[in-house]
Image: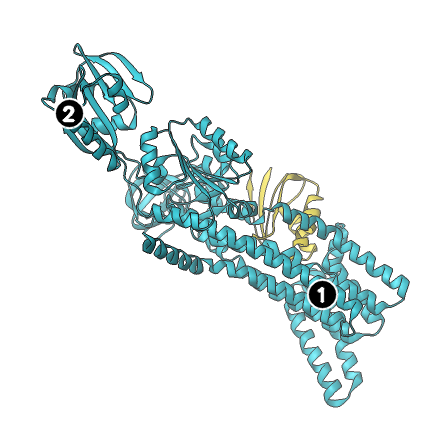
């Protein structure tokens, strides 16, 4: 280790010693009136303290960067030259002590993400050439290796079970807490935990290629991603420090006042401004990651905080997604008619048709001829010489089916109960009525209401299902708009339309067939355990299909954006106060400047850390809102 | 081509980034496009040609700036 590195690695010790020297100096000066000890102690403290700063400053200059270290080093050397040892010692001490505190507090803002990355497997039991399993570093595992996982152990790679069985907790990937049973040929994922049993797996994907690895990489990159505002601040600070340096130099040239010049150098350090926004960003992303929400970057916070409209890609996001025949009725002798119905529906892959078929079960089928799909109505076909119409009321009217008052009343009751109607008529005679409906996901109504309370204006479902089904879901959930019969490209077009009206639009999808919309939306939200496509095209990934996560994400985004604004205000405010104090007050000097400067950095970091605790506050708000919804109802 | 993943001590100032990018980016034998200095993760990722430069040289360049290298891993890219 070189001399320079030795100094740098004992930075903390140097800080401590120089702190002690300063205390000794002050005691000597004010306690015993001993100026000589005072001066010597402070000179040693200055030289000792400036050494690590100067080494870093030199390193920065070598790569043509004027860093804060450069400003501080020059200021301290200046102070020593004008024999103001008190200032030089205190400034170096404060700067070192400040960086130490910053590192510690920064570590806490990063703790949430660290917890996640630490869940990454470090070792694996790999089958060696002699057939025995030996513990190796995860870095030494390659695709195709055979690995053993024991009870309580972490699955080290994405792979396939080849021998054994057991239950695995996949919460780290899917957010689902219930263990999943795995046996031969089951897929297992890195970062999940084998709760019982012993399995041998073949490594299919390792390291960064595993699902967990991708999640970590995504989060690690997200916390470093920068919004336009941050890039501006970065650019600004690149120019800012040299400008401060020139400004201080000019001050010295014109006033010959070294004291003033070096004070400007210290005051000009752009600390809080540079660190304030990234700190909020890291804490916000960390909070999200801990709660199963992956933000792709700081821009996502900005957009999500302002979101006007949320588009849901299908009714399945809001419903259980499994339409069933809820009630049915026949008119007259309908046995043959039901067989005809099954035969006709067998030709269709419409979700309603599937529900009908699973309701009818094993039933005699007949060949179907001349099938005619009536758009927005149903199907008309010829079966066994009879004309069979299957569809809604409009189709029946079009087919001139006799509908008496009782039948019409049945239709009405069924519809009121939230059913889509499938009516069957044979040769113009009404034979059967089926009411089909999909269950709304539990809790979703409250989640949507919470989103509205957070300022989301439009909640829209865009669905490939028929308009009737979509309308029902929309009515039940209080959605603003519901459009059925859409193809993926229609959804993208609708999204574009809203954006053209100046709205900030979020699109919630599963990322497979809706990637265009996900990519085009201001915020693409991928639901469910992240498939590759979803992770790549979206801005926000909800680890499980729990809609309450989305509402949480919006709340978190709003809080994070506010937090960033507070930090910018604090940082700019402090610089303005310091600079005006330099020119208009007597009390401002280098040491106070450094103290305020370091304090402001700590204030923005601590402020950012508040975001890590958003969970409690957020869920409390949520409960209150939930309660108020209930009382309103 | 080798892929290096270097874990550093906690980085606290964003100007550290510029310094490390400058120092590692200026080395001969590294793939400049692959260089990623991650501030919050305090980590450097870079691909390099092991015939031209060694991981030790890359580590030294970072250490000379005053940043401690905690752990580094190299794997064939």
Point out the residue furthest to the front here. Answer: A405
Quarter of the image where the N terminus of chain A is located: bottom right
Pinpoint the chain carrying mark 2: A
Picture disc at residue A440: none
Place residue A2 in its image quadrant: bottom right
Q: Position of residue A573 (x, y in %)?
A: 67, 62
Residue at screen point 34% across, 33% down: A470
Q: Position of residue A337 (x, y in %)?
A: 15, 20
Neighbours of disc 2 within 10 Å: few (<14), some (14-19), many (20+):
few
Neighbours of disc 1 within 10 Å: few (<14), some (14-19), many (20+):
few
Q: Is residue A409 visible?
A: yes
Tag 2, which secondary structure? loop
Chain letter of the cyan region: A
Compute the Cα span from label 2 to label 1: 82 Å
Picture disc at residue A577: 1
Q: Is residue A602 left or right of residue A7?
A: left
Most foreground residue, A311 or A33: A311
Point out the residue furthest to the left here. Answer: A333
Picture disc at residue A362: 2
Q: Is residue B9 visible?
A: no
Q: How many numbered marks does the figure carry?
A: 2
Which-is-in-front pick, marks 2 and 1? 1
Question: Would you say the residues marked 2 and 1 are in contact, meaning their CB atoms lie under 8 Å apart?
Answer: no
Vertical arrangement, residue A56 with respect to residue B27, above or below: below
Pinpoint the chain carrying mark 1: A
**Figure colour of chain B:** yellow
Tag 1, which secondary structure? helix
Q: Is residue A437 left or right of residue B39?
A: left
Do the residues marked 2 and 1 share a common chain?
Answer: yes
Vertical arrangement, residue A571 with respect to residue A442, above or below: below
Vertical arrangement, residue A247 with respect to residue A488, above or below: below
Vertical arrangement, residue A582 with respect to residue B71, above or below: below
């Amino acid at each position: 280790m070189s001399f320079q590195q030795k100094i740098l690695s004992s930075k903390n010790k140097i800080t401590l010693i120089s702190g002690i020297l300063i205390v000794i100096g002050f005691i000597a000066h004010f306690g015993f009136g001993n100026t000589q000890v005072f001066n010597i102690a402070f000179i040693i403290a200055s030289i000792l303290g400036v050494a690590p700063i100067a080494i870093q400053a030199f390193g920065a200059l070598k790569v043509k960067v004027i860093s804060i270290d450069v400003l501080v080093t020059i200021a301290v050397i200046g102070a020593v030259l004008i024999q103001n040892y008190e200032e030089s010692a205190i400034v170096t001490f404060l700067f070192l002590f400040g960086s130490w505190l910053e590192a510690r507090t920064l570590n806490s803002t990063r703790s949430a993400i660290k917890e996640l990355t630490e869940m990454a497997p470090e070792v694996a039991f790999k089958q060696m050439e002699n057939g025995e399993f030996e513990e190796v570093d995860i870095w030494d595992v390659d695709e195709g290796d055979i690995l053993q996982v024991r009870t309580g152990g972490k699955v080290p790679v994405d792979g396939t079970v080849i021998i054994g069985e057991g239950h695995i907790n996949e919460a780290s990937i899917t957010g689902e807490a219930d263990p999943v049973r795995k046996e031969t040929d089951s897929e297992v994922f890195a970062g999940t935990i084998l709760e019982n049993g012993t399995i041998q797996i073949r490594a299919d994907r390792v390291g960064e290629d595993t699902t967990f690895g991708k999640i970590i990489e995504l989060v690690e990159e997200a916390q470093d991603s920068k919004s336009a505002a941050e890039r501006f601040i970065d650019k600004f600070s690149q120019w800012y420090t040299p400008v401060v340096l020139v400004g201080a130099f000019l001050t010295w040239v014109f006033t010959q006042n070294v004291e003033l010049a070096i004070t400007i150098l210290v005051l000009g350090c752009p600390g809080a401004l540079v660190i304030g926004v990234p700190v909020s960003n890291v804490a916000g992303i960390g909070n999200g990651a801990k709660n199963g929400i992956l933000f792709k970057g700081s821009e996502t916070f900005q957009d999500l905080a302002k979101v006007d409209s949320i588009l849901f890609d299908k009714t399945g996001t809001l419903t259980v997604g499994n339409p069933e025949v809820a009630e049915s009725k026949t008119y007259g002798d309908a046995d043959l008619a039901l067989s005809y119905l099954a035969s006709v529906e067998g030709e269709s892959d419409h979700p309603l048709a599937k529900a009908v078929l699973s309701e009818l079960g094993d039933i005699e089928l007949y060949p179907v001829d001349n099938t005619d799909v009536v758009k927005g109505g149903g199907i008309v076909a010829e079966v066994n010489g009879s004309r069979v119409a299957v569809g809604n009321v409009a189709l029946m009217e079009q087919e001139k089916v006799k509908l008496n008052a009782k039948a019409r009343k049945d239709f009405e009751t069924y519809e009121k109960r939230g059913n889509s109607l499938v009516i069957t008529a044979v040769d113009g005679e009404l034979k059967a009525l089926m009411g089909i409906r999909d269950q709304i996901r539990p809790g979703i109504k409250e989640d949507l209401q919470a989103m509205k309370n957070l300022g989301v204006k439009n909640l829209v479902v865009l669905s490939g299902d028929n308009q009737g089904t979509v309308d029902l879901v929309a009515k039940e959930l209080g959605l603003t708009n519901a459009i059925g019969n859409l193809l993926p490209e229609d959804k993208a077009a609708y999204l574009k339309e809203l954006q053209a009206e100046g709205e900030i639009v979020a699109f919630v999808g599963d990322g497979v067939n809706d990637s265009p919309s996900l990519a085009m939306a201001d915020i693409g939200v991928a639901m469910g355990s992240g498939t590759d496509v979803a992770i790549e095209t979206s801005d926000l990934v909800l680890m499980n299909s729990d809609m309450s996560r989305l509402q949480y994400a919006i709340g978190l985004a709003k809080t994070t954006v506010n937090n960033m604004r507070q930090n910018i205000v604090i940082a700019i405010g402090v610089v303005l106060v310091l600079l005006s104090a330099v020119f208009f007050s007597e009390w401002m000097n280098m040491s106070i400047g450094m103290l305020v400067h370091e304090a402001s950095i700590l204030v923005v970091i601590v402020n950012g850390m508040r975001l890590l605790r958003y969970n409690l506050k957020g869920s409390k708000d949520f409960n209150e809102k939930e309660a108020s919804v209930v009382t309103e109802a | 081509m080798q892929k290096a993943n270097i874990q550093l001590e906690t980085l606290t100032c964003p100007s550290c980034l510029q310094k490390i990018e400058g120092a590692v980016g200026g080395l001969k034998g590294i793939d400049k496009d692959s260089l990623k200095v991650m501030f919050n993760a305090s980590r450097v990722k870079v691909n390099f040609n092991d015939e031209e430069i060694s991981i030790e040289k890359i580590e030294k360049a970072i250490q000379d700036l005053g940043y401690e290298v905690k752990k580094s891993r190299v794997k064939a890219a």
